[in-house]
Image (cartoon, rainbow, N blue to C red):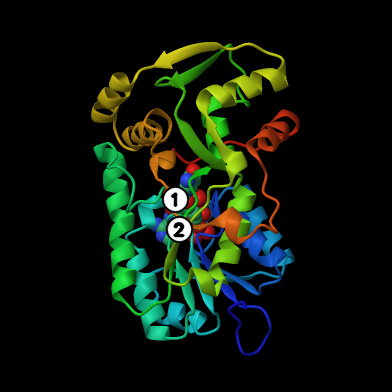
Amino acid sequence: MEIMSNSCNKSKILIFGGTGYFGKHVVRASTSFGHPTFVFVRPATAQMPPSSLQLRGEFRSLGVTLVQGELEEHEKMVSVLKQVDIVISVLPVSAVPDQIKIIDAIIAAGNIKRFLPSEFGCEMDRITPPLPPFEALLEKKKKIRRLIEASTIPYTFVSSNCCAAYFVNFLLHPHDPRPDIVVYGTGEAKAVLNWEQDIAKYTIKVANDPRTRNRVVIYRPPGNIISQNELISSWEKKTGRRFEKVCVQEDELIKLSQSLPSPDNIAVSIVHSVFVRGDLMSLDLDEDDLEASCLYPEIEYTTMDQVLDIFLVDPPEPSRAALE
Ligand SMILES: NC(=O)c1ccc[n+]([C@@H]2O[C@H](COP(=O)([O-])OP(=O)(O)OC[C@H]3O[C@@H](n4cnc5c(N)ncnc54)[C@H](OP(=O)(O)O)[C@@H]3O)[C@@H](O)[C@H]2O)c1
């Protein structure tokens, strides 16, 4: 049975950061499952790119309620929270500490049945400690986890692993065809790359599911476990091209993580953890773990093979955000 509000048969979902790289997929998934959807957005500015205004227009046409406000506006947040059942935050890493304001407002509102904070990466409590810049980022997210656990707010923590389009753009740069592709480490370590739209669909399912209350859910569909070498070889077959492989060794990445400014040092540390050490797959799942493709077999997820087919025909735009 799903979480429902009293007045209608679908839970009402409020999303923070819904206009962002990943957030827009969550908003679309929420509306596609028929949830009355609210997005908390900061007021539009003259500097805002036309694409952001276009997105807000798209959301309105989908029936989304846009609530303009700042995270500092406690009373406004409380009054919006009182109208909804579920809160999903997809705020950027830079705004992760600000989620304390959302937590305070959720406690004041007192009616929220589930909160998903902005995590959407590795299972931070069980990963081997990564290089310091990535570790510092995870510490910020962990601090929010601990605050939520210490409160009475029902929560789910989402470990969605890597966003597929984000990392295919980063690793294979299909928008900028060059003769070479960089291979980090040996290229053999297995990673988990999930299609953004599927992560968003799983997230809406997870947010409504009584089985996931106060639990961590890991998104690891078997068709999305892939190494860099397998990814490159599959891309070569699909494009009919051969790429020169430029190897960046582990010690070089470690040095770069120490010398580059932020956020490039964070990007290098993430690449080291995911693609050199294979940290996402070193985590052994047992029968007590909740894994998304097992929980929701009805969702036909997009395999990495299918993701590359999409890139061949209509490659998704690279994220403007740095890899952090
Ligand atoms: N695992 C992966 O591969 C991967 C990849 C990308 C992202 N992520 C994760 O997904 C989450 C979202 O990241 P993202 O890159 O999608 O975020 P983003 O696009 O950088 O930002 C999301 C939205 O947050 C709002 N925002 C930005 N700064 C804010 C601030 N200081 N205060 C309040 N609102 C602010 C903006 O919306 P408005 O201007 O409309 O308010 C923005 O559109 C993060 O936890 C990130 O780590 C994971």
Q: Amino acid at mark 1?
A: Leu
On screen, residue 223 versus residue 259, left or right, reads: right
Q: Nearer the viewer, residue 237 or 21?
A: 237
Binning the other alpha carbons within 10 Å of mark 1 as few (below 14), some (14 to 19) or many (20 upward) gives: few
Q: Is residue 170 visible?
A: yes
On screen, residue 103 versus residue 156, left or right, reads: left
Which residue is located at x 50 percent, y 51 percent? Answer: 160
* Residue at the farthest bottom position: 6
Distance (Cα) linking label 1 and label 2: 6 Å
Secondary structure of the residue carrying tag 2 is: loop
Give the numbered dot on residue 289.
2
Which residue is located at x 48 percent, y 32 percent? Answer: 190
The quadrant of the picture occupied by the N terminus is bottom right
Q: Give percent across and percent down for residue 56.
A: 64, 60
Q: Give percent across and percent down for residue 188.
A: 46, 24
195 up-or-down from 114: above or below: above
Residue contact at pointers 1 and 2, CB within 8 angstroms: yes
273 up-or-down from 214: above or below: above
Which residue is located at x 72 percent, y 35 percent? Answer: 310
* Residue at the farthest front position: 287
Q: Amino acid at mark 2?
A: Asp
Residue under numbered circle 1 = 285
43 up-or-down from 35: above or below: above
On screen, residue 198 versus residue 145, left or right, reads: right
Which residue is located at x 37 percent, y 65 percent? Answer: 99
On screen, residue 79 versus residue 64, left or right, reads: left
Binning the other alpha carbons within 10 Å of mark 2 as few (below 14), some (14 to 19) or many (20 upward) gives: few
